[in-house]
Image (cartoon, rainbow, N blue to C red):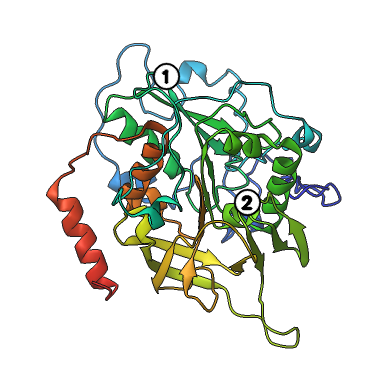
């Protein structure tokens, strides 16, 4: 039985049968019981149905019911129309797991991706840590395709908003963008420019990892130069391994990190779950200002020996990776992993522009209203990190 399917062993509650005298039955499951009233009378307990509180009504037009909500006298002999089935508030996502294992659809990898501009081109120590230039045309005219991976599995904390931020910042620059939402069970297209993975609970996380391992589209896209942003559970999935449901599961291996509930000795108590604000100072190679976000996770992530790349940044407030070096996330080439929700790109548009520059090269600067920086400065002061 799937996590998202109702339990067939549990009987559905049946509504009480109407009594033969025509009175309204009392349903104790709907709060305070009240005496039964004849079916043709309205319950007088509601203030809007008490005569002394009723508002004056306009005269009824010919052929029109005299009161809204009451049947016309000429229609009272007709049987009432059957009530529509109440809409479901939540719908169970359909996850045909057999389709999670289909190979990626054959698509040509998009070209035209460029690396981000370095803060200082003469600093080769930084240049060696970022993607190298590609032999491509200077201008890009095709639509930028942004893949939102398994939003019903990896979208618990609103990380799908990162796709909205990227799309809008391209359109403000007069560039075309398309968000490709990839539901669980559908093959991940290998021809997108940017791939986004968000946060999720243990079982959806394991389902997502299983589908992505079998599909292998993201690995092929990264080899072709695609950009990846993975947040929280997505960050753990693109690493080497992660814990879920009391077991260790294999990740995609896009970055050289591993996640556990704790790296302490087995007899040590597990550390508590971390929930709260997080502030980091990004690695200087990225050329970003202070990054703000929100973290909600119970994992601890560390780099593997000899792993290529570097931490996303140094934690000023919060936990991040939860390791002794006090860092958050990991950056390897065009792949960025972090624990920052927010959505992180909404709170940090400079990071969004960095990702877009990896696709388009140098982009025109966007000048927002001064209130944006004022609010950001106020936020930093409130967190006592300014």
Gap in angstroms between the C-alphas marked 1 and 2: 28 Å
Using the image as rendered, state which of residue 178 and residue 226 is in the foreground.
Answer: 226
Residue 17 appears in the picture as rendered: no
Instruction: Determine the residue positioned at 77% across, 32% down.
Output: 99
* Residue 212, image x, y percentages: 69, 41
Instruction: Determine the residue positioned at 41% across, 69% down.
Output: 314
Using the image as rendered, state which of residue 222 and residue 13 is in the foreground.
Answer: 222
**Name of the residue lying farthest toward the bottom:** 267
* Residue 365, image x, y percentages: 22, 38
**Name of the residue lying farthest toward the left:** 370
* Residue 291, image x, y percentages: 35, 60
Residue 233 appears in the picture as rendered: yes
Q: Report whether 362 appears left or right of 358.
A: left
The residue to which callout 1 is attached is 142
Q: Report whether 159 appears left or right of 262.
A: left
Instruction: Determine the residue positioned at 66% across, 81% down.
Output: 270
Using the image as rendered, state which of residue 353 and residue 116 is in the foreground.
Answer: 116
Query: Which numbered circle lies on residue 238?
Result: 2
User: Which quadrant of the figure contains the C terminus?
Assistant: bottom left
Q: Compared with residue 261, is residue 359 higher up or lower down, i.e. above or below?
A: above
Instruction: Determine the residue positioned at 62% across, 25% down.
Output: 82
Quarter of image, res 181: top right
């Amino acid at each position: 039985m799937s996590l998202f399917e109702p339990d067939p062993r549990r009987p559905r509650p049946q509504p009480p049968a109407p009594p033969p005298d025509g009175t309204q039955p009392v349903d104790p499951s709907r709060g305070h019981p009240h005496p039964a009233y004849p079916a043709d009378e309205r319950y007088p307990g509601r203030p809007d149905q008490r005569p002394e509180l009723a508002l004056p009504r306009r005269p009824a037009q010919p052929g029109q019911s005299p009161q809204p909500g009451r049947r016309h006298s000429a229609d009272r002999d007709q049987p009432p129309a059957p009530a529509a089935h109440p809409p479901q508030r939540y719908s169970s996502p359909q996850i045909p797991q057999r389709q999670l294992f289909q190979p990626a659809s054959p698509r040509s990898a998009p070209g035209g991706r460029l690396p981000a501009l370095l803060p200082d081109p003469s600093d080769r120590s930084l240049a060696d840590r970022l993607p190298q230039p590609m032999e491509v045309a200077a201008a890009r005219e095709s639509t930028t395709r942004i893949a939102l991976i398994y939003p019903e599995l990896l979208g618990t904390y609103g990380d799908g908003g990162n796709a909205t931020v990227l799309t809008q910042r391209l359109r403000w620059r007069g560039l075309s963008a398309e968000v490709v939402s990839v539901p669980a069970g559908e093959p991940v297209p290998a021809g997108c420019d940017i791939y986004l993975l968000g946060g999720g609970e243990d079982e959806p996380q394991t389902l997502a990892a299983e589908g992505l391992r079998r599909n292998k589209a993201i690995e092929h896209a990264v080899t072709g130069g695609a950009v990846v942003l993975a947040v929280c559970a997505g960050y753990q999935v693109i690493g080497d391994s992660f814990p879920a449901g009391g077991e260790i599961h294999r990740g995609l291996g896009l970055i050289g990190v591993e996640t556990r509930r704790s790296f302490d000795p087995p007899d040590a108590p597990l550390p508590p779950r971390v929930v709260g604000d997080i502030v980091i100072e990004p690695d200087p190679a990225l050329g970003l200002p202070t990054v703000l976000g929100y973290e909600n996770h119970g994992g601890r992530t560390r780099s593997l020996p000899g792993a290529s790349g570097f931490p996303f940044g140094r934690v000023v407030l919060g936990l991040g990776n939860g390791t002794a070096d006090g860092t958050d996330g990991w950056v390897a080439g065009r792949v960025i992993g972090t624990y920052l929700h927010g959505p992180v790109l909404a709170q940090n548009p400079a990071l969004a522009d960095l990702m877009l520059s990896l696709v388009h090269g140098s982009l025109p600067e966007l000048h927002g209203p001064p209130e944006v920086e004022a609010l950001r400065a106020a936020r930093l002061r409130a967190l006592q990190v300014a």
